[in-house]
Each structure stands twice: as structure tokens, then as C-alpha cells.
């Protein structure tokens, strides 16, 4: 299933975050800030050009069970992950 991160998401409560447009030195801080800004029940749809496995571990360590992660696409060059804030 292909997902185009350049297109807006129509579903309420889902916010796109395209990491490819954020400078690498700011990327992790921007992602953590965006996740912290989400309200319970909201989702950040994260797009990247590579699978950020170390980042996923950091998010899990920092947020614990508050953030649920689910891959939407795991194709090479097209990684899309939904981060849902638990209610």
C-alpha cells in the first residue's frame, strides 16, 4: 500500500509529519516535540526515507505505553508510521 506524504490527510485527528523536510540535526527534537503536542486519541503519521529503528526505541523509552506505533508502509525509501496517543 502506497502513501503519499505530500498530500493532506482527510481523517480528523491524524496529523502528517514528513521528516524528509526537516534538517537532520533538528529531526529528533522536532519529532519528540510533535509527539508531545498530540492529545489523547490523536495520531501523527510519520513519513521518512529510511526505517528509524533507533528513534523508535528512543520514543518507546521516553513515552512508554502512551504512544502506540503501527507501520502503514515499510517499503524501501517509503516508511510511513502512525504514532497514536493512547486515550
Image (cartoon, rainbow, N blue to C red):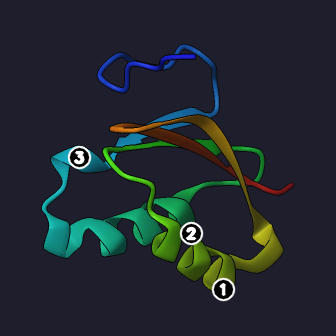
Q: Quadrant of the N terminus?
A: top right
In the displayed structure, 3 sits above or below 46; it is above
Q: Left or right: 6 with respect to 84?
A: left
Q: Give the image location of residue 55, x and y in percent.
A: 47, 72
Dot 3 crowding, Cα within 10 Å, few <14, some 14–19, many 20+: some
- Nearest the camera: 16 or 52? 52
Disc 3/disc 1 C-alpha distance (Å): 23 Å
- Mark 3: which secondary structure? helix
Disc 1/disc 2 C-alpha distance (Å): 9 Å
Mark 3 or mark 1: which comes first in sequence? 3
Mark 1 or mark 2: which comes first in sequence? 2
Q: Who's the residue at 67% across and 54% down the image?
A: 39
In the displayed structure, 10 sits above or below 51; it is above
- Mark 2: which secondary structure? helix
Q: Give the image location of residue 79, x and y in percent.
A: 45, 41
Which residue in the protein does label 2 denote? Answer: 56
Dot 1 crowding, Cα within 10 Å, few <14, some 14–19, many 20+: few
* Quarter of image, res 6: top left
Q: Left or right: 18 with respect to 68?
A: left
Q: Which mark is residue 47?
A: none
Mark 3 or mark 2: which comes first in sequence? 3
Q: Give the image location of residue 35, x and y in percent.
A: 53, 62
Q: Who's the residue at 86% across and 55% down the image?
A: 87
Q: Which mark is residue 61?
A: 1
Q: Left or right: 87 with respect to 68?
A: right
- Nearest the camera: 80 or 41? 80
The reply to whether the C-beta atoms of the residues labelled 1 and 2 are less than 8 Å apart is no
Which residue in the protein does label 3 denote? Answer: 20
Amino acid at each position: 500500500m502506497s502513501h503519499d506524504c505530500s498530500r493532506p490527510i482527510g481523517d480528523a485527528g491524524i496529523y502528517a509529519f514528513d521528516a524528509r523536510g526537516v534538517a537532520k540535526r533538528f529531526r529528533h527534537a522536532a519529532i519528540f516535540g510533535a509527539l508531545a503536542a498530540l492529545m489523547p486519541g490523536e495520531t501523527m503519521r510519520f513519513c521518512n526515507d529510511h526505517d528509524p529503528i533507533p528513534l523508535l526505541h528512543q520514543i518507546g523509552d521516553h513515552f512508554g505505553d502512551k504512544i502506540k506505533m503501527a507501520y502503514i508502509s515499510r517499503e524501501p525509501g517509503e516508511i510511513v508510521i502512525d504514532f497514536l496517543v493512547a486515550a
